[in-house]
Amino acid sequence: MKLIIKIFLILLILVKAGDAFEIDPYPKDDSSLTEIFSINCLQMTQSQQMLKAYVMIGVKSNFQNPKKHLEKAIIDYDKRMYQVRAYFQKRLTKKSQESGKVAFDEALALWKTNKKLFEKEPTKENVVIIQKNFLKMIDKLLEGTHPIATPELELISLTGKLCRKPMEVTIDYLIRMWGVEVEDYEKNIESTIAKYHTNLKELSLNKLNNKESLALLEKAKKEFRFFEFMYKSKTKFIPSLLSKKADDNFLIIREIKQIYKKQAS
């Protein structure tokens, strides 16, 4: 127990209240498929950052002012959602790609529902709806790009999955802290952890890697141990620590994705 408390205190001391997340703008110029594919990947990942901010408001944490950043993010995210959809609607021109266009329409509908819920005061009932809608939306955004995805682009997409796993663990933990029952909590977390390691292994073996990306993947692996420790620990973790660790992971995976984008281009 003393060791657990000591580790917790060390991690707590390391927490620094840096800037909260920002929604990356859609490129102004005519960008490549690789760039917009990456932006679509951000649509998936940053939906989880927005959900995390929503839950932080719910648990009464003011760390990084989640209310202020969420209000701004809603506007920026909404604009980018339409821009990404428009881009792929133009690219998906073949009859065989019609399912991709439909998937983007369905993703937009799910976002519209969540946008309305985000604009209301956070509630325990709505967080469950938002979480489920976002998970469906992520699947639809993946489905939308599938008809034109190359193996290299699929690897970029896989970095997004690796990025989202720590956020999913964090969000479920915070939701339970809020007093909301998470269905099949232990089963889902264990599945998320297993998928993280599967995705990490697959990325480690891909041809887009270089010395820098491999080092970053190893760093991500070490950082993920925190989330595994958190899940198994009897110690209660404070929201700011969890939020910061999830954001730190996002930045590591983002560096890896930038390397893959360069290699794929």
Image: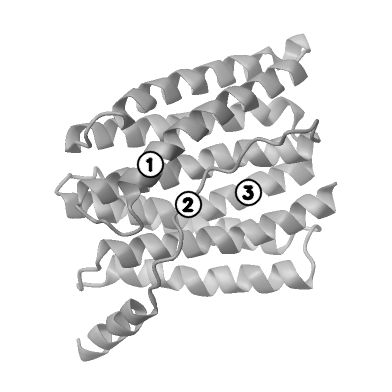
As helix, strand or loop, the secondary structure at mark 1 comes to: helix
Mark 3–mark 2 distance (CA, rounded to whole Å) = 21 Å
The answer, for residue 185, to whether it is visible in the render is no
The answer, for residue 38, to whether it is visible in the render is yes
Most extreme residue toward the top is 95
Q: In this view, does 224 lie above or below 1?
A: above
Mark 2–mark 1 distance (CA, rounded to whole Å) = 9 Å
Estimate the x, y position of residue 129 in percent, counting from the top left: 29, 30
Tally the marks.
3
Could you tell me the amino acid type at mark 3?
A: Leu
Q: Mark 1 = which residue?
A: 70
Mark 3 or mark 2, earlier in chain:
2
Q: Is residue 106 above or below residue 197?
A: above
Q: Which mark is residue 158?
A: 3
As helix, strand or loop, the secondary structure at mark 2 comes to: loop
Estimate the x, y position of residue 212 in percent, counting from the top left: 74, 71
Q: Residue 21 carries which label?
A: 2
Residue at x-position 44% and y-position 55%: 20
> Front-most of 34 and 3?
34
Estimate the x, y position of residue 265 in percent, counting from the top left: 85, 46
Q: Is residue 138 above or below residue 162?
A: above
Residue at x-position 80% and y-position 30%: 30
> Front-most of 242 and 183?
242
Mark 1 or mark 3, earlier in chain:
1
Question: Crowding near pointer 2: few (<14 within 10 Å), some, many (20+)?
Answer: some
Could you tell me the amino acid type at mark 2?
A: Phe
